[in-house]
């Protein structure tokens, strides 16, 4: 363990999730069925770390982010944020928590009120989260320049801005709360491709300059590798593999991760599609996901790379 | 060279309102040869779908094709009357729309919808149409039993495959795919693309492939046109474009997709608010590589993260 890692554990992680489970009830006319969305999730995020949650739609990645944002109540398990249990927070404590943990949503078109100017949107956030600030004007100018926009945008309405600019305003509003943790749920998937990288770079900068811990939820493996320090792969509500981003994507060990990595379009790949191999992977995923004997196997100690594997198939 | 399947010359499309006209496509020219996959890439609003819709003659008011020609096998598409269009569409050129999986009729069985398409455009008996539907479903690896299913009983990927099979029903010479996989997960996306490649090998049609995902486009297409603001700014074979793009916008698009392998380098993409105005006509730089001259600086990338 390096010296910085020791220091980090001394302060304690920013987020510590222990055996978190959440299920939704689907009710048809005559039947009620519990559908597990998250199963026994363990996840730790150090301060200033960027962790990416990846998986296909329905794998539970947004649900996990929503549990952290207090938008869903987990069925069981424990979530500690900055050392404090978030279950049962009430009143002022909830408000304080919400300043601490902020969320950036996928759709910048829906998350900004179209009837107000940007200055009102930011002023409101400042008044709520940092009421002690006197000169709101200069604070707002500072916020928009942090996210890479000029102060002119303050007097614009959201519809006058491009998707990328709007997402930056949404991030500026998040910063107005002075959060220590940002939950970014697919923040770039609705943006035009050429400005996506700009928003990812902005998130990276926030971590570097303000030490903000970021949970980046995405289905895009390449952007997860680009932005995050560590990746956790979710499949059917379980974290099946986790580790340092580059190491994990270079040596995917779980069949589901292999499936995802193999499906990312890559112009340099010579043979793109191997049907029998694909079928074998799917079968293995199925076997592992129903196996009663799942164990965490360390693949590489130094990069914290582990996989949740069937005991009998790991050698 | 043989007569191209599709030839678009100087196509200009305007969206006309009381006060002003907006150019959705501006003097766009390209050709697609038999059996070729031609890609049109660009961001939302750049005119890719406008081009596709004008080739199919699907544009409605206030859009107006104000200039240019669309030639299919040498015949003028823009001059066709309604009857000729009906005979031409689907028999010669078929289109799969964005989120096409939602374009199936929810209250009719899949088989019925196949029969409808085949008999409307080519006639014949129900039995013959049903037989063809069987073949097509097998081609996209869906059990023909599913012809009795309703769309909601199938997954998104299956529905998308069915729509693609339907488009191939009458052996068109050209298939237009407008963002065929945008709403799908990566794994399903790859399977659909493989399916398209297989069908193309078997049936030999040409493809006009429209998407904003550059990595996808580079993997699938033979030649690529990059669109910006209604104009094509660069046109080149896929391999040339990947390693030797010349227009700063193309480079920004390519730079927007971080790689899955190799060292992590800082990418810049396109700076917020960068605009290209007054885009010139394409100039030939040799070997099928055409570039619109630009005075904007070429982007530099490659700083390690």
Image: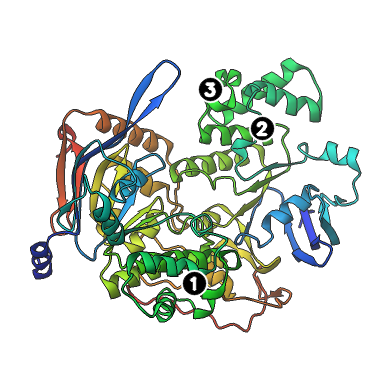
At x 41%, y 81%, the residue is A138
Where is B130 relative to B288, above or below?
Answer: above
> Could you tell me residue B115's position as x and y percent?
72, 23
Q: Which mark is residue B143?
A: 3
Asked whether, in this view, residue B108 is left or right of residue B252, the answer is right
Q: From this viewpoint, is residue B254 visible? A: no
Q: Dot 3 surroundings within 10 Å: few (below 14), some, or many (20 or more)?
A: few
Where is B119 relative to B199, above or below?
Answer: above
Q: Which residue is mark 2?
A: B166
Asked whether, in this view, residue A157 is left or right of residue B36, the answer is left
In three-dimensional space, the C-alpha distance between marks 1 and 2, rounded to whole angstroms, equals 51 Å
Asked whether, in this view, residue A89 is left or right of residue B193, the answer is left
Residues at circles 1 and 3 in contact by the CB criterion of under 8 Å? no
Considering depth in this image, is B23 or B225 the residue closer to the camera?
A: B23
Q: Quadrant of residue A302?
A: bottom left
In three-dimensional space, the C-alpha distance between marks 2 and 3, rounded to whole angstroms, equals 15 Å
At x 24%, y 35%, the residue is A75
Element on which disc 1 rests: helix
In which quadrant will I find the N terminus of chain A?
bottom left
Marks 2 and 3 on same chain:
yes
Single out the mark in the foreground, 1 or 2.
Answer: 1
Chain ID for label 1? A
Chain ID for label 3? B
Q: Which mark is residue B155?
A: none
Q: Which mark is residue A119?
A: 1
> Could you tell me residue B279's position as x and y percent?
70, 76
Q: Dot 1 surroundings within 10 Å: few (below 14), some, or many (20 or more)?
A: many
Q: Quadrant of residue A297?
A: top left
């Amino acid at each position: 363990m390096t010296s910085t890692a020791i220091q980090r554990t001394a302060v304690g992680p920013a987020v510590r999730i222990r055996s978190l489970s959440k299920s939704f009830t689907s009710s048809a006319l005559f039947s009620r069925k519990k559908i597990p969305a998250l199963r026994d999730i363990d996840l730790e995020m150090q301060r200033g770390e960027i962790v990416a949650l990846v998986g296909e739609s329905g794998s539970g990645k947004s649900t996990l982010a929503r549990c952290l944002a207090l938008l869903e109540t987990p069925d069981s398990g424990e979530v500690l944020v900055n050392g404090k249990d978030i279950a049962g927070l009430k009143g002022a404590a909830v408000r304080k928590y919400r300043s601490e943990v902020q969320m950036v949503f996928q759709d910048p078109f829906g998350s900004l009120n179209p009837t107000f100017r940007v200055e009102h949107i930011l002023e409101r956030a400042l008044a709520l989260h940092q009421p002690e600030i006197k000169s709101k004007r200069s604070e707002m100018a500072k916020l928009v320049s942090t996210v890479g926009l000029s102060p002119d945008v303050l007097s614009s309405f959201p519809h006058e801005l491009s998707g990328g600019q709007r997402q930056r305003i949404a991030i500026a509003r998040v910063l107005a709360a002075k959060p220590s943790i940002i939950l970014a749920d697919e923040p770039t998937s609705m943006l035009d491709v050429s400005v996506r990288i700009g928003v990812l770079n902005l998130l990276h900068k926030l971590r570097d300059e303000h030490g903000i811990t970021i949970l980046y939820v995405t289905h895009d493996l390449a952007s997860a590798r680009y932005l995050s320090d560590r990746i956790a792969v979710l499949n059917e509500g379980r974290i099946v593999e986790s580790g340092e981003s580059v190491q994990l994507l270079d040596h995917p060990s779980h069949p589901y991760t292999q499936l995802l990595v193999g499906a990312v379009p890559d112009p340099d790949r010579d043979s793109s599609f191997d049907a029998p191999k694909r079928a074998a992977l799917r079968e293995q995923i199925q076997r592992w996901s129903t196996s009663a004997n799942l164990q965490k196997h360390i693949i590489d100690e130094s990069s914290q790379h582990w996989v949740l594997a069937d005991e009998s198939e790991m050698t | 060279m043989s007569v191209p399947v599709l030839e678009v010359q100087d196509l200009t499309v305007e969206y006309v309102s009381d006060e002003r006209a907006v150019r959705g496509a501006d003097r766009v020219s390209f050709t697609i040869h038999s059996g070729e996959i031609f890609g049109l890439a660009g961001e939302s609003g750049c005119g890719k779908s406008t081009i596709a819709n004008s080739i199919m003659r699907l544009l409605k008011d206030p859009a107006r094709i104000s200039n240019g020609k669309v030639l299919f096998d040498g015949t003028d598409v823009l001059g066709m009357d309604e009857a000729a269009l009906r005979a031409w569409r689907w028999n010669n050129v078929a289109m799969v729309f964005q989120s096409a999986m939602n374009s199936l009729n929810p209250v009719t069985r899949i088989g019925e919808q196949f029969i409808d398409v085949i008999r409307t455009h080519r006639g014949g008996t129900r039995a013959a149409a049903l037989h063809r539907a069987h073949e097509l479903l097998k081609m996209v690896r869906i059990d023909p039993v599913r012809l009795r299913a309703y769309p909601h009983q199938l997954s998104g990927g299956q529905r998308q495959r069915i729509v693609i099979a339907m488009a191939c029903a009458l052996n068109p010479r050209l298939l237009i795919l407008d963002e065929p996989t945008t709403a799908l997960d990566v794994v399903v996306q790859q399977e659909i693309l493989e399916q398209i490649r297989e069908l193309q090998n078997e049936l030999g049609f040409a493809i006009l492939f429209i998407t904003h995902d550059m990595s996808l486009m580079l993997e699938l297409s033979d030649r690529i046109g990059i669109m910006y603001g209604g104009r094509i700014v660069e046109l080149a074979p896929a391999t040339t474009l990947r390693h030797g793009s010349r227009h700063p916008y193309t480079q920004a698009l390519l730079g927007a997709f971080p790689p899955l392998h190799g060292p992590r380098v800082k990418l810049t993409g396109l700076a917020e608010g960068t605009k290209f105005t007054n885009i010139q006509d394409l100039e030939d730089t040799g070997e099928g590589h055409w570039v619109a001259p630009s005075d904007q600086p070429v982007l530099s990338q490659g700083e390690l993260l």
